Amino acid sequence: MASSFRVLHVIPLLLLVILHEPGQQAQAFPFRSLLQTCQPSGSIPGQSGTCNTENGSECCRNGQSYTTYDCSPAVTGSTQATLTLNSFAEGGDGGGAAACTGRFYGDDEMVVALSTGWYSGGSRCTKNVVIMAASTGRSATAMVVDECDSTTGCDAEHNFEPPCRNNIVDGSPAVWDALGLNQDDGQAQVTWSDA
């Protein structure tokens, strides 16, 4: 009886050691990253200003609080996201020039911005991603040129728009057209992966 009692206490301890041992996590539980979640990191107060609503952009309101994120959900082979519409053209609703290249892009170019966590400090800059629309089943390849900032917003640099949610792929009109989506919808459910 005493030996079975010890075994029942030793097994959970052994599992904890394995799961916390560096390098052993993936072998012990290969789906560990799926259990990790991205929680809000804080909030910022809203400040209104001159906001270009060209593509149905939401504009900040004075006194409203907006959630911020330092992270995005884990990237998988088919990461779920919300596609939003953005003009990367000079004078468009995207604000300033693209963070990756310092330039603007025409609405006919296949480019996207990713939420802060997925943008990953610029590590995906000028790399391609493959996006698939849930409603049409169509896919398209686009180049990452900008960050959809999840940490700040409600200022001139961000078109007086709130911070991006943590699961956004912000696509040019060309991306929406290639996916066969209606730009008037403003948002669509997609999956994406690195190309």
Image: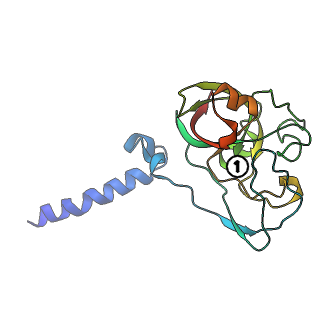
Element assignment for label 1: helix
- Where residue 38 appears, x then y in whole percent? 56, 55
Q: Quadrant of residue 110?
A: top right
Percent across and percent down for residue 47 are 82, 67
Q: How is the image coloured?
A: rainbow
Is 85 placed above or below 60 here? above
Which residue occupies the extreme left position in the image?
1
Q: For the point 66% across and 48% down, which residue is it?
A: 117
Q: Is residue 66 above or below residue 164?
A: below
Left or right of 22, for residue 6: left
Which residue is drawn at the image coordinates 77% and 59% (left, top)?
A: 152
The residue that appears at 69% across and 41% down in the rendered structure is 184
Q: Taking the image as drawn, is residue 26 in sight?
A: yes
**Near-viewer residue (64 or 166):** 64
Q: Please, what is the three-letter code of the amino acid marked with disc 1?
A: Thr
The quadrant of the rendering that contains the C terminus is: top right
Q: Residue at point 57% right, 32% down?
A: 133
Crowding at label 1, few (<14), some or many (≥20) Cα neighbours within 10 Å? Answer: many
Coordinates of residue 131 in the picture (x, y in percent)? 61, 31
Q: Dot 1 corresponds to which residue?
A: 116
Q: Nearer the viewer, residue 194 or 60?
A: 60
What is the quadrant of the N terminus in the image?
Answer: bottom left
